[in-house]
Image (spheres, rainbow, N blue to C red):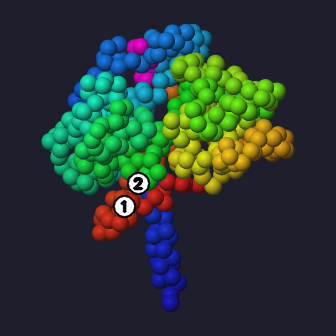
Amino acid sequence: MPNSLLLLLLLLVLRAVAGDAAPDSSDPCAGRRIHIRDLPPRFNTHLPRHCDAAFPLADPSSSATSAPTCESLANHGLGPRTHARSRSWYRTDARLLEPFFHRRLLERRCLVADPGLADAVFVPYYAALDSIPYVLDPSLLNSSALHGASLAQFLARDRPQILARRHGHDHFMVLAGSAWDHSQPPRAEPRLLGTTSLVRLPEFENFTFLALESRSWPWQEHAIPHPTSFHPASLPRLEAWLARARRSRRATLMLFAGGVSRPSRPNIRGSILAECANRTDACVVVDCSAGKCSHDPVRYMRPMLGAKFCLEPPGDTPTRRSTFDAILAGCVPVFFEDAAARRQYGWHLPPGRYDEFSVHIQKETVVLGGVKIAETLAAVPDAEVRRMRERALEMAPRVLYRRHGSTAELREAGKDAVDLAVDGALRRIRRRARALEEGQPERIYAQEDDSVET
C-alpha cells in the first residue's frame, strides 16, 4: 500500500479518535463560537430589582455576618467586599452565580451575533433567582411546575429556528443550585415545597444545565464548583494568596465547618461531631449554623489555613461549598462518599487524581465500623500530607471564579471555573451535534467527556 494512502488512513483514524477536537485548529474560534440569546429583562436583569421584597438574600437573624439584602448584588453578583481594603475577597451569595456567570461570558472571545454561525447558544436566564418565590412562598406551592414555563414559551415563539436547528442540544444555561431541587416531575402530586420542575420541562430536556450539584445520571446537567468568596483580578493577588496558604503553619489535625446540631439518627456528620467533642486536641469545629458563615469568609478560612485536613461530610445534599474553600486554603479535603465531589466535578477536578489531593474514608466504616477519623488521618505521613496540600493548591485556580475584568496576565495563566465549565459544555454540545449529524442519537447521552484528565 503506498505511503500516501497509509498516511491518509492514519489521519482519518486520529480524527475519529479525537472526537471532541475542534474541526480546524488553525482557527482559534473553531468549535467555540457562542451566541448569547437576547432575552427580555424579566428573565434576567429585572429579577434582582426585587431583592428587598420578592426574595431574601440575607439572613436577618445573623446581621453581623449577612450583607444587607440588595448589597449582595454588588459587583455583578460577587457581593460587597469583605472590608474596605479588600481587593479579592467578597461576601458572595451562591444564588447570584447566574448574573456573575452571564457577566463573565460577555467577556469571552468568539461570541457571535448570528446564531446560525454559533456552535453553542447560551441562555442567560437567572433560573435560581426566578425560582425563589416558588420555593419560599407556600401559597405558590401548587404553581411550582410553572417555573421556567414562560421562558420556554418565549424561546419557542421568538426566532424559533434557533431552537429548532438542533432541537435544543446546542443550548446551555447556568443553574445556581442543585439540579435535584429543580427536577420534580411537572405532574407530581402532591408538590414538594422547595422544589420546581425546571429541568424536567419537556421544552428543556435537551439543554445542558451547569448546576452546583448534578443528579446521579447527569446526561442533562453537569456540576460546576460552588463559588467561594475569593475572586482575584490579577495574577499577583492569586499568587500572593497561594503563597500564604503554602507557608501557613498547620497546628490542627482536622477541621469541620458546618452546622453543629446533632442528628436524630446515626450518620457521618453526627459521628464527626461526637469525635471532635472527644478529641479537642486534634479537631476544631467551626459553627456555621443558621448561616453564620454565609457572608463571613474570615470565620472559616482562617481556621482552615491552620488545619491539615478538612472534613467534608454530606449534608442535605452530597456536595458542599466547604470543599472548595478547603482546596483554596490548602486544607486537604476528606470525603466520605464519592457523590460528594468525585462523581460531580469531572471537568474541574479530574476523578482519576483525587488520591493526589484528598483522602477518602468510607462513611459506613466510621458510623457502623468504629473507625476513628483522627487516628486514620494522623497515620498519614507528613511528607504525604505536604504533597497532597501542594496538589490541592495546584487545583485551586481551576475551582475559583476570578473577577470579571481581570488582567490578561491572569487570564493567560490558566483557566478558572467559568472557563472550564464553558469548555466542558462546548465539548458536550459538539458531541451531541455530531451524533445528530451522523444519525446516531444514542450517542447523545454518552458521558465520556465528563471526566477529562488534564
Residue 64, relative to residue 367: is it above or below? Answer: above
For the point 38% across and 56% down, which residue is it? 430
For the point 69% across and 25% down, which residue is it? 285
Give the residue number, with chain letter if any, for mark 1: 444
Residue 102 in picture, x, y percent from top left: 38, 32
Can residue 27 be spotted in the picture? Answer: no
Can residue 15 be spotted in the picture? Answer: yes
94 part of magenta stretch: no
Q: Label 2 neighbourhood size at 10 Å, few (<14), some (14-19), many (20+)?
A: some
Tag 2 near tag 1, CB within 8 Å: yes
As drawn, the residue found furthest toward the left would be 157
| Residue toward you, 310 or 421 | 310
Q: Quadrant of residue 146?
A: top left
For the residue labelled by badge 1, is the local secondary structure a helix, a strand or a loop?
Answer: helix
| Circle 1: residue type | Ile
Residue 223 in picture, x, y percent from top left: 48, 44
For the residue labelled by badge 2, is the local secondary structure a helix, a strand or a loop?
Answer: loop
* Magenta span main SS: helix
| Residue toward you, 47 or 34 | 47
| Circle 2: residue type | Trp
As drawn, the residue found furthest toward the bottom would be 1
Give the mark nearer the N terminus: 2 vs 1: 2
Give the residue number, with chain letter if any, for mark 2: 219
For the point 31% across and 52% down, which residue is it? 206
Residue 327 in picture, x, y percent from top left: 65, 36
Residue 11, relative to residue 191: is it above or below? Answer: below
Q: Which residues are magenta?
A: 69-77
Residue 109 in picture, x, y percent from top left: 41, 40
For the point 47% across and 16% down, which residue is it? 59
Q: CA distance from mark 2 to mark 1?
A: 9 Å
